[in-house]
Image (tube, grey):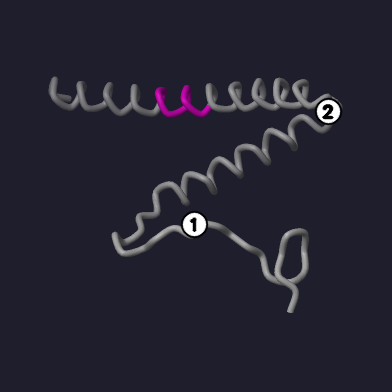
Amino acid sequence: MSSADSANSADSANSADSANSADSANSVDLERYAEQAAALIGLPIPPDCKPGVIANLERTAAIAQLVLEFSLPPEAESAAVFVPIGGGPGGVTG
């Protein structure tokens, strides 16, 4: 194996370790976020429910990332005010 191959192998291993560390760090951050957010609003999370809460936060983060990565054309304008139709609170009826 040449020294270039060794360097590439080491870089690949380091990249994989970094990705795994990022995933681990992200899970830890989401667990901490869940605990702090729940405490802030006075919502107890039973220990047996915590893995599901964290899984849902991970799923939500993945969905949000897809939305953030989606680029809109310059002519797309955001709505100034959203008004739901259908008679809900603040909505227009018929």
Name the N-terminal-most of marks 1 and 2.
Answer: 2
Question: Disc 1 to disc 2, how far (Cα)?
Answer: 34 Å
- Name the residue at 44% across, 58% down: 78
Mark 1, residue position: 80
The disc at residue 23 is none
- Name the residue at 58% across, 59% down: 82
Q: Amino acid at mark 1?
A: Ala
Tell me: residue 83, above or below residue 10: below
Mark 2, residue position: 43
- Of residue 81 and residue 48, the one placed in the foreground of this image is 81
37 lies left or right of 60: right
Would you say the residues marked 1 and 2 are in contact, meaning their CB atoms lie under 8 Å apart? no
- Judge whether residue 19 is colored magenta: yes
Please state the horizontal and vertical placement of residue 90, each as a whole percent of the image. Answer: 73, 60
44 lies left or right of 77: right
Tell me: residue 48, above or below residue 63: above
